[in-house]
Image: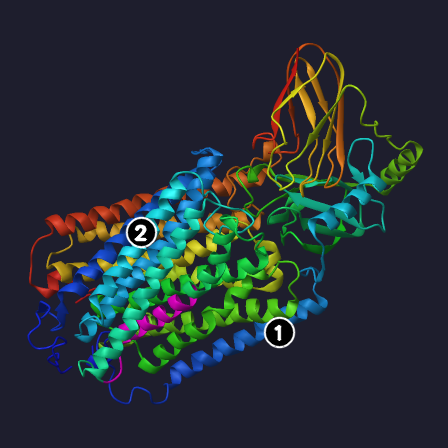
């Protein structure tokens, strides 16, 4: 090896002169590849089938929760899922460790789905049905995803941004149904709107979710007299929560509500010890539960 | 190269720092830089060992056939793996390289020995705080720690103490070079290796400064002194740290490529200007390319995404392609000068059982795959397919592990025998080790890319989703687990070969036995 070629010695004098021909040809080949690749990216923006969403809005988690709640109230089915008619925008809120609500869409229809996270960063990863679409979701930022759904089926969506210790439980489904079934559901829904039981009264216990977004209620113990017991849980937090009771053969689950909502559950309780908890995935494991004692 | 007697750096009457002159290279080595290089190198290897161990646990948990760890332990190990292998290991290694390249290679004393030791103590303290709080389970926020996820504040303080220590080391590096030149100890252009390490130091400076901008508010948030941190902004500054730092790795890897080619084949870069232009391109492109982390983020326009993400990402391939050509071209030119004929005659002259060549080949091959997978995911539209899937860890292990770590192993095989004047304990085992590591990393990363294309999420303890996970996901993740096990076995073999070489390698002064040629006679 000539001394001036050594990587440990100083280069030979005059090393800064013109780069030789072979290397210049190589650089031209690299340059042409860059131009071609760049052209393809720009052309795909104009004519390609799938591009990154370019519609965003800035909404605080509370403002977004208000829109989601109004959307859920309009289209909620008896099974708790939300049936989105063609032509309507859909909403999906991500928070530890659930997506809310579960959406049912009409086959072969183009939707705009407004996506946002309400507590921390989350991922929207549509992996079912041979799809692979991945977006980053952040609090305060709402993404408008234009999605043309295909054939009927039940397609898995998971969170793929690490969001906490129960991250691997965070999933939902986009269920796609034929147009006929969607029309049937809409008709059934118009018939009877679910009347929320009125809170208050003698046997009603008041409860609140942690307002900061921690996965906890404001108390871990409740007491009630035997008989008909109602728990009303206010949700001031940026996460969806509900209240549910289990134990001694009882298993009742209240409606999931977003910020500003109240979840109510009622059960006939004999003396004994019960667990009240939030049934949103991962919340009970993280400590959002307590003991309900009926003496 | 003329050997210049160094000018004493101490005033008459003060004690002169002890030094020795290397019998092979003629370089003058002072006691403190030698000890400091060694101390940082040992810390780097310990960090790598910790990172590798966490990595093995993660890999075996993500194989659905095994699921070694529970989810809480998995996220703890995931955080430890990221901190140890992507932050501590490259920065300790870079500091060792900076001390060596600024003092030993220029025959110079350090600008300040005290500053050197202060930086080392701070970095060790920061590393201990980070690993301690992670092992306590109060910082399982992944090494990215995106707010509003919040860890115990010791975690952020550990990062900050470590960063301040590293900044002191960079200051000492720059001032050592300035002092070597003003004192007349070193004249003319810097040797290529010092030049490359200097480029890495500039990148390290940019990345650590960016990290401070991200982590100081995150620390204040964790301590409750400020109410919120905008996560999208944090992500930008954090990846100014996280991604730029990997180019410190890449530059060090390229230096190792040149080192192996020089010591095993006797080949140098075909053209010094071409090579140095490529290094400068890394400086220009490595920081703004962090835009690719935003490709599918909300509230950022396609203009920013295209320029800062896609186009910078494409451009970042250029210097790596140039170095690949310069290393391979240098070897080919050398062998042709010695009479190799035909298109591939030069390849037939190489001894493929040579440990350095085995590692160099694996490193070039896997790094090229990493460049390809990275170029794919930096493409605006393709990022929507790959973002936060297993495609991403496949890419970063192709570059940082298959590329960088394997190159360092090969560099150690050719360099350490010269440093300690002992032959490799078993050259044959060393070569097998390099090929086995190559095979393990190829299997692991190829299977991870496959899983990513099917949508398997990264950083997820369990992909069964209560029975709703896709049936096609398990096969590639199990194959990746096999690759992890092979690579871990090869990693352990590397340690065995190096330790036995240091303790039981045959003493020799014969250059042909210490640094056997990879060219067939």
Query: In which quarter of the view is residue A107 placed?
Result: top right
Q: How is the image coloured?
A: rainbow
Q: Is residue B316 above or below residue A135?
A: below
Q: Is residue A285 left or right of residue B366?
A: right
User: Is B367 one of the magenta-colored residues?
Assistant: no
Identify the residue shown where x is 84% and y is 30%. Answer: A196
Identify the residue shown where x is 48% and y is 45%. Answer: B151
| Magenta span | B188-207
The numbered disc on residue A39 is 1
Q: Residue B303's x, y, as percent?
A: 64, 70
Instruction: Describe the element under mark 2 as helix, strand or loop.
Output: helix
Query: In which quarter of the view is residue A194 placed?
Result: top right
Instruction: Describe the element under mark 1 as helix, strand or loop.
Output: helix
Question: Local crowd at mark 2 within 10 Å, few (<14), some, or many (≥20)?
Answer: some
Q: Residue B277's x, y, as percent?
A: 39, 79
Q: In this view, does B85 lie to the left or right of B293?
A: left
Q: Mark 2 points at which residue?
A: B125
Q: Residue B458's x, y, as percent?
A: 52, 47
Q: Residue B280's x, y, as percent?
A: 40, 77
User: Is B202 one of the magenta-colored residues?
Assistant: yes
Q: In this view, does A98 lie to the left or right of B515?
A: right
Q: How far apart are marks 1 and 2 (CA)?
A: 49 Å
Question: Local crowd at mark 1 within 10 Å, few (<14), some, or many (≥20)?
Answer: few
- Front position in the image: B479 or A212: A212
User: Which quadrant would the C terminus of chain B be assigned to in this image?
Assistant: bottom left
Q: Can residue B437 be seen in this view?
A: no
Identify the residue shown where x is 24% and y is 64%. Answer: B116
- Front position in the image: A220 or B172: A220
Q: Which of marks 1 and 2 is in front?
A: 2
């Amino acid at each position: 090896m000539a001394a001036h070629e050594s990587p440990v010695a100083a280069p030979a004098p005059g090393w800064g002169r013109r780069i030789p021909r072979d290397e210049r040809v190589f650089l031209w080949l690299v340059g042409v590849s860059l131009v071609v690749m760049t052209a393809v990216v720009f052309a795909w923006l104009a004519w390609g089938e799938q591009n990154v969403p370019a519609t965003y809005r800035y909404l605080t988690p509370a403002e977004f929760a208000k829109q989601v709640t109004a959307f859920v109230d309009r289209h909620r089915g008896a099974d708790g899922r939300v049936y989105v008619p063609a032509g309507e925008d859909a909403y999906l809120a991500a928070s530890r460790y659930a997506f809310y609500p579960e959406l049912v869409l009409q086959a072969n229809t183009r939707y705009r789905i407004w996506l946002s996270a309400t507590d921390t960063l989350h991922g929207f990863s549509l992996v079912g049905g041979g799809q692979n679409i991945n977006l980053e979701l952040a609090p305060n930022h709402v993404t408008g995803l234009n999605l043309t759904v295909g054939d009927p089926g039940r397609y898995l969506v998971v969170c793929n941004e690490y969001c906490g210790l129960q991250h691997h439980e965070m999933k939902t489904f986009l269920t796609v149904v034929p147009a006929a079934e969607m029309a049937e559901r809409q008709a059934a829904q118009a018939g009877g709107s679910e009347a929320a039981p009125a809170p208050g009264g003698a046997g009603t216990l008041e409860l609140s979710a942690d307002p900061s977004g921690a996965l906890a209620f404001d108390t871990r113990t409740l007491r009630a007299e035997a008989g008909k017991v109602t728990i009303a849980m206010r949700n001031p937090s940026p996460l969806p929560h509900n209240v549910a009771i289990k134990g001694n053969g009882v298993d009742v689950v209240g409606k999931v509500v977003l910020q500003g909502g109240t979840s109510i559950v009622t059960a006939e309780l004999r003396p004994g010890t019960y667990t009240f908890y939030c049934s949103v995935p991962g919340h009970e494991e993280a400590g959002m539960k307590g003991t309900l004692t009926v003496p | 190269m003329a050997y210049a007697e160094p000018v004493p750096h101490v005033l008459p009457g003060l004690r002169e720092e002890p030094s020795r002159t290397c019998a092979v290279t003629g370089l003058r080595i002072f006691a403190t830089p030698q000890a400091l290089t060694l101390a940082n190198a040992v810390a780097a290897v310990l960090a790598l060992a910790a990172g590798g161990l966490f990595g093995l646990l993660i890999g075996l948990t993500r194989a659905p056939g095994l699921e070694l760890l529970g989810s809480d332990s998995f996220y703890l190990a995931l955080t430890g793996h990221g901190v140890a292998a992507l932050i501590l290991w490259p920065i300790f290694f870079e500091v060792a390289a900076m001390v060596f390249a600024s003092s030993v290679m220029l025959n110079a004393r350090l600008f300040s020995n005290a500053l050197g030791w202060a930086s080392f103590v701070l970095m060790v303290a920061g590393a201990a705080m980070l690993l301690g709080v992670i092992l306590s389970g109060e910082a399982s926020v992944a090494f990215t720690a995106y707010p509003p996820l919040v860890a115990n504040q010791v975690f952020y303080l550990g990062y900050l103490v470590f960063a301040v220590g590293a900044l002191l080391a960079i200051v000492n590096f720059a001032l050592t070079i300035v002092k070597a030149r003003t004192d007349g100890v070193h004249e003319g252009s810097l040797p290529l290796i010092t030049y490359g390490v200097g480029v890495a130091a500039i990148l390290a400076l940019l990345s650590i400064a960016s990290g401070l901008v991200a982590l100081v508010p995150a620390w204040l948030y964790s301590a409750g002194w400020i109410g919120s941190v905008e996560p999208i902004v944090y992500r930008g500054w954090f990846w100014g740290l996280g991604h730029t730092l990997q180019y410190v790795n890449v530059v060090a890897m390229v230096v190792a490529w040149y080192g192996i080619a020089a010591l095993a084949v006797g080949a140098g870069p075909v053209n010094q200007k071409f090579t140095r232009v490529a290094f400068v391109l890394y400086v220009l492109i490595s920081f703004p390319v962090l835009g690719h982390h935003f490709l599918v983020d909300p509230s950022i326009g396609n203009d920013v995404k295209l320029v800062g993400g896609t186009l910078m990402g494409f451009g970042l391939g250029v210097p790596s392609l140039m170095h690949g050509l310069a290393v391979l071209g240098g070897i080919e030119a050398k062998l042709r000068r010695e009479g190799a004929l035909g298109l591939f005659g030069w390849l037939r002259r190489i001894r493929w059982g040579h440990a350095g060549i085995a590692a160099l080949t694996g490193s070039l091959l896997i790094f090229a795959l990493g460049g390809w997978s990275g170029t794919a995911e930096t493409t605006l539209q393709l990022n929507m397919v790959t973002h936060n899937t297993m495609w991403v860890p496949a890419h970063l292990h192709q570059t940082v592990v298959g590329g960088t770590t394997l190159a360092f192993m090969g560099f150690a095989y050719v360099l350490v025998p010269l440093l300690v004047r002992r032959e490799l304990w078993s050259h044959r085992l060393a070569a097998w080790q390099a090929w086995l590591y190559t095979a393990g990393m190829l299997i692991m990363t190829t299977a991870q890319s496959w899983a990513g294309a099917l949508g398997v999420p990264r950083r997820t303890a369990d992909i069964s989703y209560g029975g709703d996970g896709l049936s096609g996901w398990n096969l590639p993740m199990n194959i990746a687990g096999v690759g992890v096990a092979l690579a871990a076995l090869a990693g352990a073999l590397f340690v065995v070969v190096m330790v036995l070489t240091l303790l039981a390698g045959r003493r020799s002064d014969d250059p042909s036995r210490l640094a056997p040629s990879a060219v067939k006679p």
